[in-house]
Amino acid sequence: MTLSNPAFPSSTTFDLISTALQDGNTKADAIKRGNGIFVFTLKNSAGETESWYIDLKSTGEVGKGVPEKSDVTLSLSDEDFAKLVAGKVQAQRLFMGGKLKVKGDVMKATKAEVVLKSARPPAAKL
């Protein structure tokens, strides 16, 4: 089942994270480092919003929607999310600029970048 939505181009990231978490060692490490349930609410250029979650508290599951319980919700534009995942901008910069809203445990939010790195393509070696 695909998690991506064509109206949100950066949502393919959640498929990549889900695939990365299929590996037992990667999942165990991510749960140890993340230790929380992260919700990402994205807003596209048409003004529509949609949410995805990453459970790094117990299951290592990635899904659409908002779970019953979560530790932190990060709200930002689809475009800024794509930049964040690509490593072109830091979450702290988006937060300070008012482009990233955080609800819940702000300290857990700082761990979200670690999770998103697993969706980055490997750097080219020259």
Image (cartoon, grey):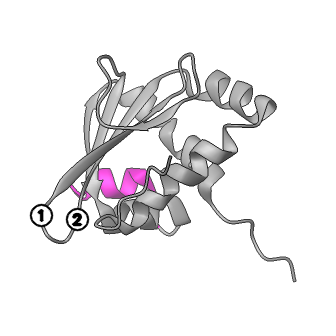
Q: Where does residue 15 sit, x and y in percent of width and height?
A: 54, 52
- Tell me if residue 117 can be seen: no
In the rendering, which numbered label is found on residue 106? none
Q: Where does residue 86 sit, x and y in percent of width and height?
A: 54, 66
Q: Which residues are magenta?
A: 89-100
Residue type at mark 1 is Gly
Find numbered disc 1 in the image and state the secondary structure of the residue it sits on.
loop
Q: Is residue 14 above or below residue 26?
A: below
- The residue at the point 15 percent across, 59 percent down is 48
- The residue at the point 38 percent across, 59 percent down is 81
In the rendering, which numbered label is found on residue 47? 1
- The residue at the point 14 percent across, 70 percent down is 46
Q: CA distance from mark 2 to mark 1?
A: 5 Å
| Callout 2 crowding tier (Cα within 10 Å): few <14, some 14–19, many ≥20 | some
Circle 2 is placed at which residue position? Answer: 44
Q: Viewed as shown, does residue 106 lie left or right of 29?
A: left
The verdict on residue 121 being magenta is no
Q: Nearer the viewer, residue 57 or 19?
A: 19
- Tell me if residue 77 can be seen: yes
Q: In which quadrant will I find the C terminus? A: bottom right
The verdict on residue 94 being magenta is yes
Q: Is residue 95 above or below residue 121?
A: above
Check whether the beta carbons of the residues at disc 2 and disc 1 lie within 8 A of each other: yes
Name the outermost residue toward the right: 126
Q: Is residue 76 above or below residue 101?
A: below
| Callout 1 crowding tier (Cα within 10 Å): few <14, some 14–19, many ≥20 | few
Residue type at mark 2 is Asn
